[in-house]
């Protein structure tokens, strides 16, 4: 991939069913991955935005967790319907989506 | 995890044996993960450096691939014996290790 303007890391960690921490995958991270991918196509943002799946990013109980670099902005509790806002406001527009940011004590 | 000064993403992608692209895992990425983890302990850098495993980062043929944010520096062909240099020079010292950087046409 060429060096992107924004690199989105999505936690796709999985834990066994019933694990007390749960996991981002259990909380719907796969849908986020699909939606970010869909928007890259729709916005023709192939050279501007990269998406990478990761192992655990930490705040499992608040997931799904999405981390945007180089800004170092972590989002938690992201739903599919939030992805377009993150994409347009933050990735393309440069303004982080405050309401989805991880609490300061977490990140 | 607290927000780190440097966040190291290590590609742990795997492909079936004999796949023409190979993979970073086949090229030794697991050893890098262990060595970065060991150095975090040894340098007591828990609050400064985070390590996360990722899916494919792109330049499979040149792997193992390591990406450092917020700097946006990609290293390729990293060996276990290179990790201490990356750790001390770049992660703690702030100076990227030029000889291991991915070529400009890659990243």
Image (cartoon, coloured by chain):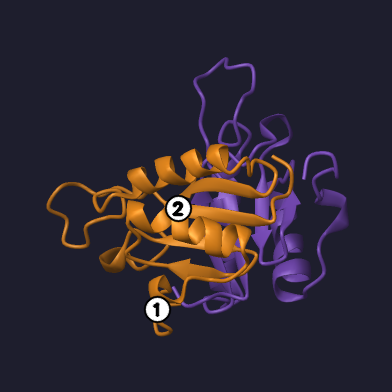
Chain colours: A purple, B orange
Measured Cα–Cα span from mark 1 to mark 2: 17 Å
Name the spot of residue B92 as percent of width and height, x first: 62, 58
Q: How many numbered callouts?
A: 2
Q: Is residue A5 left or right of residue A50?
A: right
Q: Is residue A37 visible?
A: no
| Residue under label 2 | B10
Q: Is residue A20 above or below residue A22?
A: above
What number is the disc on residue A63?
none
Residue B89 is situated, as x and y percent measured from the top left of the image, at 54, 64
Task: Give neighbour class at mark 2: few <14, some 14-19, many 20+ (Cα, 10 Å).
Answer: many
Instruction: Pick whichever, A56 or A64, lies toward us.
Output: A56
Tell me the chain of label 1: B
Identify whether B35 is placed above or below A71.
above
Residue beneath the point at 48% across and 60% down:
B86
Which of the pair B44/A64 is nearer the observer? B44
Quarter of the image where one finds residue A45: bottom right
Q: Can you identify the residue that label 1 sits on?
A: B106
Secondary structure, mark 1, is loop
Work out whether B23 lies above or below B62: above
Tell me the residue at 46%/60% (across/down).
B85
* Location of residue A9 in the rendering, given as x and y in whole percent from the top left corner: 58, 55
Which numbered disc flags the more N-terminal residue, 1 or 2?
2
Q: Secondary structure at mark 2?
A: strand
Q: Along the line of sight, which residue is nearer the eye, B72 or B15?
A: B72
Q: Is residue A12 left or right of residue B79?
A: right
Pointer 1 and pointer 2 on the same chain = yes
Chain identity of mark 2: B
Quarter placement of the N terminus of chain B:
top right
How many other residues sit within 10 Å of disc 1, few (<14), some (14-19) or many (≥20)? some
Say which residue appears at 16% left-offset and 62% top-offset. B20
């Amino acid at each position: 991939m060429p060096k992107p303007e924004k690199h989105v890391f999505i936690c796709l960690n999985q834990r066994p069913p019933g694990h007390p921490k749960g996991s981002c995958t259990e909380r719907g991270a796969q849908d986020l991955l699909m939606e970010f991918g869909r928007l890259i196509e729709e916005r023709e943002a192939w050279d501007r935005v990269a998406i990478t799946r990761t192992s655990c990013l930490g705040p499992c109980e608040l997931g799904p967790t999405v981390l945007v670099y180089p800004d170092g902005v972590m989002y938690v509790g992201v739903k599919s319907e939030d992805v377009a806002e993150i994409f347009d406001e933050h990735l393309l527009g440069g303004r982080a989506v405050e309401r989805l940011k991880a609490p300061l004590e977490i990140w």
